[in-house]
Amino acid sequence: MFLITSGIKYQVMITGYRTSEQFKEICENAYNGNWSDAFDNCVEYGFYANDLIRHFEQDEYCGIEAADLAILAEGASNRR
């Protein structure tokens, strides 16, 4: 993310945005059947389908199936 002030471009670092911990929280909610909470977490944390896929591929075990990513992405999209 970039911030432009008086013609000078600064890179702004966002901490705590789409982290592994947030992804694990989303997965835990989905795994436990709390889909509404999982959808809300996706929206709150800024996860889109490509982010969910990337984290799913990097995480050794998150407790959900690959097909559940589509449900999460669609549910979050409906909330947006």
Image: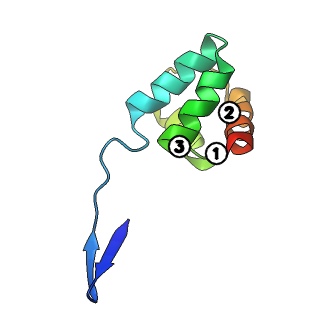
**Is the N terminus in the top left, top right, bottom left or bottom right quadrant?**
bottom left
Q: In front: 23, or 54?
A: 23
Residues at badges 3 and 1 in contact (C-beta under 8 Å)? Answer: no
- Which percent across, then down, holds residue 56? 55, 33
Q: Is residue 48 above or below residue 22?
A: below
The amino acid type, in three-letter code, at marker 1 is Ala
Q: Residue at x 47, y 24 (%)?
A: 24
Vertical arrangement, residue 52 with respect to residue 38, above or below: below
The mark nearer the N terminus, 3 or 1, is 1
How far apart marks 3 and 2 lie (CA) works out to 14 Å
**Marks 3 and 1, how far apart in space?**
9 Å
In the picture, the disc for residue 54 is 3
The amino acid sitting under disc 2 is: Leu
Please report the residue visible at 63 percent of the width from the left and 19 percent of the height from the top.
30
Tag 2 residue:
72
Q: Earlier in the sequence, mark 3 or mark 2?
A: 3
What residue did someone put label 1 on? 49
Mark 2 vs 1, N-terminal side: 1
Q: Secondary structure at mark 2?
A: helix
Residue count near mark 2 (Cα–Cα under 10 Å), binned few <14, some 14–19, many ≥20: many
Question: Whole-percent x and y of residue 22?
Answer: 44, 31
Q: Circle 3: is it few (<14), some (14-19), or many (20+) Cα within 10 Å?
A: few
Looking at the image, do the residues carrying marks 3 and 2 touch, with CB atoms under 8 Å apart? no
What's the residue at 47%, 35% (across, down)? 58
Relative to 30, does residue 76 appear above or below in the rendering? Answer: below
Q: CA distance from mark 2 to mark 1?
A: 8 Å
User: Would you say residue 28 is visible in this rendering?
Assistant: yes
Residue under the image location 48 percent in, 23 percent down: 25
For residue 33, the mark is: none
| Callout 1 crowding tier (Cα within 10 Å): few <14, some 14–19, many ≥20 | some
